[in-house]
Image (cartoon, coloured by chain):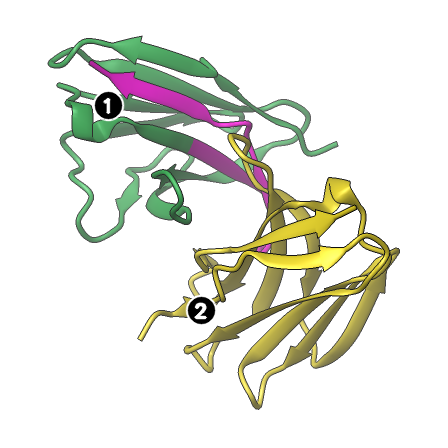
Chain colours: A yellow, B green
Amino acid sequence: QKEVEQNSGPLSVPEGAIASLNCTYSDRGSQSFFWYRQYSGKSPELIMFIYSNGDKEDGRFTAQLNKASQYVSLLIRDSQPSDSATYLCAVTGTASKLTFGTGTRLQVTL
Amino acid sequence: GAVVSQHPSWVICKSGTSVKIECRSLDFQATTMFWYRQFPKQSLMLMATSNEGSKATYEQGVEKDKFLINHASLTLSTLTVTSAHPEDSSFYICSARLAGVPYEQYFGPGTRLTVT
């Protein structure tokens, strides 16, 4: 079982719609959860992090964490073509090392 | 703030030669830096954790004698790929962690290595 799992996609949503990206993790001791966006040929850039159960909103982005279900998600409202990228879920445990999922490719269509 | 640079951004070398990649935290002190490798259409895989003034900790399966890491100061870590082979061709990315902020990492722009 992979430590951090994501659907590889592509997830295709029309411009202006809500994109929902999901991630599950296997280590119950995981403490911090991150969403990174990676454009082709570029390094990841941090979008959001969440430590506690519930929702965390930042602009058009909302991260949701459910530790009991070992599930973290990212919602992108009013999706724009510039949001088209690969979204990486990452998790840290007690060792503070980031473990990445394989990423979900998002395509926002006009 | 929290800017990390890498040099070079891309490099082509011949098989059997060595290549050094630099990672610098430009506006903060990084007690810990991380080195990742990413093959096409795959996710980032942690290679090693580098702590200033001490030996790097390598992940399982990563050859420490092939991938030499030096973290000589709080703002600079280097990765040297020794005796490079075509299978070492990859995207190498470093990240740096702010002292006192244990869970946030800031990534450099990456170095594309091609070994011919």
Residue drawn at x 29%, y 46% is B57
Residue A110 lies left or right of residue B59; in this view the side is: right
Residue A70 is tagged as none
Query: To which chain does the residue with label 2 belong?
Result: A
In the image, which residues are magenta? B93-116
Could one spot residue B54 in this view of the protein?
yes
Query: To which chain does the residue with label 1 belong?
Result: B
Residue B91 lies left or right of residue A41; in this view the side is: left
Q: Tell me the amino acid under the disc marked 2.
A: Glu
- Judge whether A95 appears above or below B109 on screen: below
Q: Nearer the viewer, residue A106 or B56?
A: A106
- Judge whether A24 appears above or below B25 on screen: below
Q: Nearer the viewer, residue A68 or A38?
A: A38
SS at mark 2 in the image = strand
Residue on which disc 1 sits: B81
Residue drawn at x 44%, y 33% is B93
Residue on which disc 2 sits: A5
Q: Residues within 10 Å of mark 2 (few under 14, many from 20)?
A: many
Instruction: Pinpoint residue A4: horizontal percent, then vertical percent.
Output: 44, 68
- The quadrant holding residue A55 is bottom right
Instruction: Pinpoint residue A57: horizontal percent, then vertical percent.
Output: 84, 65
Instruction: Pinpoint residue A80: horizontal percent, then vertical percent.
Output: 81, 47
Q: Residues within 10 Å of mark 1 (few under 14, many from 20)?
A: many
Instruction: Give the total number of marks visible in the rendering.
Output: 2
Q: Tell me the amino acid under the disc marked 1.
A: Val
